Amino acid sequence: MSKTVIEITGMTCSHCEQSVAKELSGLSGVVSASADHATGTATVEATAVSEQELADAVEEAGYKAVGFQTLDA
């Protein structure tokens, strides 16, 4: 399993966080997902998911993923 931190532009409130986390959590292979508008990031723990899938989910929520940092868990 790996942990990925996604830099996201446009999140301004807790509703934004919920929208992003919901879309990310719906991806196959995602074990957990959370977002923080104060830092402009989301953190995803997953068994197998591509950066493109993560970016698409963020975009589906109405925001833009601008960077990824993957940490091995």
Image (tube, rainbow, N blue to C red):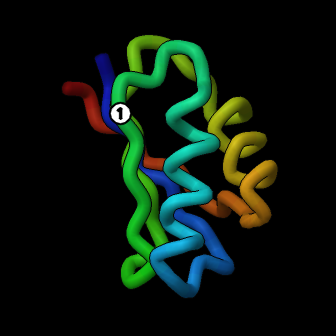
Element marked by disc 1: strand
Residue type highlighted by circle 1: Ser
The structure residue drawn at horizontal position 73% and vertical position 56%, both measured from the top left corner, is 61
Q: Is residue 18 left or right of residue 62?
A: left
* Quarter of the figure that contains the C terminus: top left
Q: Is residue 15 left or right of residue 10?
A: left
Q: Where does residue 27 sit, x and y in percent of width and height? A: 60, 25
Q: Where does residue 24 sit, x and y in percent of width and height? A: 56, 39
> How many labels sit on residues?
1
Q: Where does residue 67 sit, x and y in percent of width and height? A: 58, 57
| Foreground pick, 65 / 38 | 38
**Disc 1: CA contacts within 10 A as few (<14), some (14-19) or many (>=20):** some
Q: Where does residue 18 sit, x and y in percent of width and height? A: 51, 60
The structure residue drawn at horizontal position 70% and vertical position 30%, both measured from the top left corner, is 53
Q: Is residue 10 left or right of residue 40?
A: right
Q: According to the image, label 1 marks what residue?
A: 32
The structure residue drawn at horizontal position 77% and vertical position 41%, both measured from the top left corner, is 56
